[in-house]
Each structure stands twice: as structure tokens, then as C-alpha cells.
Amino acid sequence: MTDLHHVLPDFSTKTFTHLLPSLEKAQVTVSDLLTLEAIDIARRALVPVAELQRLANDLLQALHSAVRSEHQDADADADAAEGIVGPDQTRYAANIGQGSSWETVQTLDKGLDTALGGGIPKGYVVEVTGESGAGKTQFLLLLLLSAQLPVPLGFAKSTLYISTEAPLQTARLSQMLDNHPHLSNEPANRKPSLSKVLSIQTPDLESQEHILQYQLPVVIRRQNIGLVVVDSIAANYRAEFDRPGVKHSGAAMAQRGTQLTRLGHLLRQIARDYSVAIVVANQVADRFSAVGADVSLTYRQASHSYYEGNAVFNQPRENNTTPRSTQSSASQADFEPLTLDHQQRWFTGWGDEHIHGPESKAYKTPSLGLVWTNQIAARIALIKEPLYAHVQGEPGHLEREIIGWKRQMKVVFAPWAPPSIIASGQTAAGIPFEIVDAGVKSLNSLSEAT
């Protein structure tokens, strides 16, 4: 059965082991058994009709029992909410009370934690996205240690690191432990340690799905896990769907969308049921606008052109010598308020700035698309931008040279914290930070970041 363990995880298949391989080979689902004629399925899978009918009857009874159990749990929830708690429900009600407390894991930096609304709470799936070198892994490694601290700094629990790319950087963790004042000055009985950081590596998509669905809940229960980190969530999907020879058809995209939806549901359920915080790292890709699109237009200008019909995209602006003929009609579509190209600037982390001047920023888009965006509760973007200096090149000419990098942390969306905005002219910026021996450290101002 292709989906039996998803629909009825506790269903006993001991008496039907001789039927399941044939049913799986014929791609028969639980829905097929309950809705189609048994004789038709028997011919399709080449199995005895009588035994197939018996399997269908047992599945139906198991489903009825599962539904009744859910109704009983719902009634117990309602009774507990009204203060009606029986002797068999005492432990259940106590667990509900414990799970409702608001606890967060902090970055141990005042500026960053303030922007995060106090930290990253348990019970949610949070994404940290950014390009290579932006500081995603450094951010996550610090959380692996701070989650071991007692409340309110952490959860006073062990942590789990699930890697899809490079193995756990234990040397970097030791460096943070030795240099961060909150970590190194704790008493011995409360001091975080590497022994409380568990690590699992998933080399491919198949092993990743198996580990997340079957092994992760067991590890959380047995090892008292409070924080789960997945670094990164997109690597195995990219390797599976972007490898040479794979057709990028609509069916393939639909299949990936279904898998991402299932993954998001699984992670949210684990975060909620086991009261853990799940933080995933995500990669980014370059975002390309249509030819002739004017990325410096503000939202007000774009909305005005859309609703009033004014062709502001074809109107020359001050210090803009671009001929009107090069401005294509496709640029208008890019900035119509209801198009994805226009809306994604408010949920990707890149593009919500008001850009002025001849230089344009390199926009990024988090991997896995809009389907994955709908699966997470919060997105934190780590933005990395170059710092330039003008150096003497050929006689009479100055050339730009990269002399460093500035990094910013931006809360793109979260149900417990507002988007990160620093008043810097007309630019919507994040919290500037730097990577130091102790982990990550916020800077007081954008000027300090430069």
C-alpha cells in the first residue's frame, strides 16, 4: 500500500503481508480500496478477491476507530478548557498546561533578540534564509548552544542538528562556547556542552524523508530535544529535481509541490505536538526582472500606474536617459500589485526597499518557491551586501573594488514580531550584525556596519 503508513500509522499488517507487495507494485492506495470494486483491484494487483475484501473491511474499521478517538480527544479538550477534568484526564490536562507556556530560544544579543520579538518560540517552524556567506550556519550554531540555557534564554534541553550538506562544525561550536560570555560563565551544571548537541546527516531526499517522519519523533522523546535545526532544507530537493536529465515539466513541479506541502505539514505537526522549535536554513537564487523593468519604482508609483492607467514606466525620470522604446510592456506586468513579481518583495526579504540612484541591488529569492513559503510560520533573511571603495585604475579613471561585506538580519514575516525596519532615509533595512568569535553580534547603526 503506497500510503497506508501515512493514513493509518498504527494499522497492523501482520495478516496481510503477502498482499502488500503486490498492492504497492500496482500503486493501490487506501482510498482505492475503500472506493473501488474489490474485483477490479484484485485483477489489477493479481491478488485474491476474498482476502482483498477482508483487508478493506479491516481498514474501514480502523478508520472508524481513529475517527471516534479524535472525537473523544476533542471532547476531552473542551472539558479541560471548561475545568471539567476526570481522574483519567489529569495527566493530559497537565501536559496541555505545560505546552501553552511561551518560551523562546534567544541569540543572546540584545539587538537581534529585540528584532525577533524576544527570540524564536517553540511550537513553530522558522526559516533562516540567505546567500552563501551571509551567516546562516553561524546563526544556527549559536542557537544550538543557547537552547541549552535555562528559561528565559533557552529551553534547558538538548538540541538536534540535521545536516543535508556539510557535517556539524564542532570546532566552531567549541570556539563559541569559549568566547561567548553567556555560555562560558554559566555554572558547570547549567553550562551548554557539545555532548548535548546531537547530529544526523541526510545525504539524499529519501533518507531525509525517512529520518524526519520516523526517527525524528523518537529522538525528540528519548533525548529531551528542545530545538531542531535543519541545514539546509532545500539542498536535497535541488539535488533531486535539478539534476541533469530531469524534465522540468508541470507534472514534476506538481510532484515537488506535493512533497513540500507534506514536509511542511509534518514539521508543523512535530513542532506543535512535541513543543519544540524547528529552525531550517534555506538557500536563495538570483531574481531576474523582465527586460526593461524599472526596479527603482516605488510601490505608490506602481499602484498609481496600475489603477489610473498612467504609463509611468515609459515616462523618463530625472537623470534617466533610457529611451522610451526600450521600456517593454512586460515591465508594467512586473509591478502590477496583484502579480507575484510585485508581491514577492514583501515575503522574500529582498525588494521591499525604495531604491534610488543609478545602482541597483542584487535581489534574491528563497529556494522552493511560494509553496514552501506557505508552510513556514516565520522567515528571517540574512542579507549580505558588498562594501566598495574607489581605487585608481587607468589614468583618469576610478574603479570600484570590494573591501568588505556588511550583513543585516531582517524579520520578513512572523506572527509574534513585526518586520525589521531601521529608519535610514527611505530604505527598509534590517538589523546590521557581524560574525565574531562568540557567534553573531548586532551593530548599533548602519554606519557602524560600514
Image (cartoon, rainbow, N blue to C red):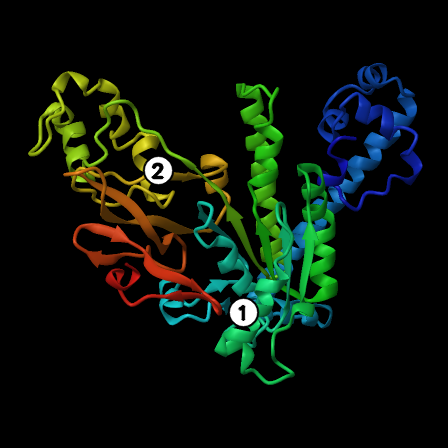
- Identify the amino acid type marked 2: Gln
Image location (x, y in percent) of residue 408 = 35, 55
Location of the C terminus by quadrant is bottom left
- Residue 355, quarter of the rendered image: top left
Q: Is residue 302 above or below residue 47?
A: below
Label 2 packing within 10 angstroms: few (<14), some (14-19), many (20+): some
Residue that mark 1 sits on? 176
Which mark is nearer the camera, 2 or 1?
1
Name the image quarter holding the N terminus: top right
- Residue 344 tag number: 2
Task: Find residue 271 and report its horizontal and vertical position in percent.
Answer: 59, 56
Of residues 263 and 283, the one nearer the viewer is: 283
Question: Tag 1's secondary structure?
Answer: helix
> Residue at the spot x=39%, y=62% of the render?
434
The disc at residue 392 is none
User: Picture coordinates of residue 214 (x, y %)?
Assistant: 73, 48
Along the polypeptide, which appears first: circle 2 or circle 1?
1
Q: Nearer the viewer, residue 224 or 70?
A: 224
Q: Residue at x 54, y 18 (%)?
A: 249
Q: Residue at x 67, y 50 (%)?
A: 70
User: Residue at horizontal 42%, vertical 68%?
Assistant: 118
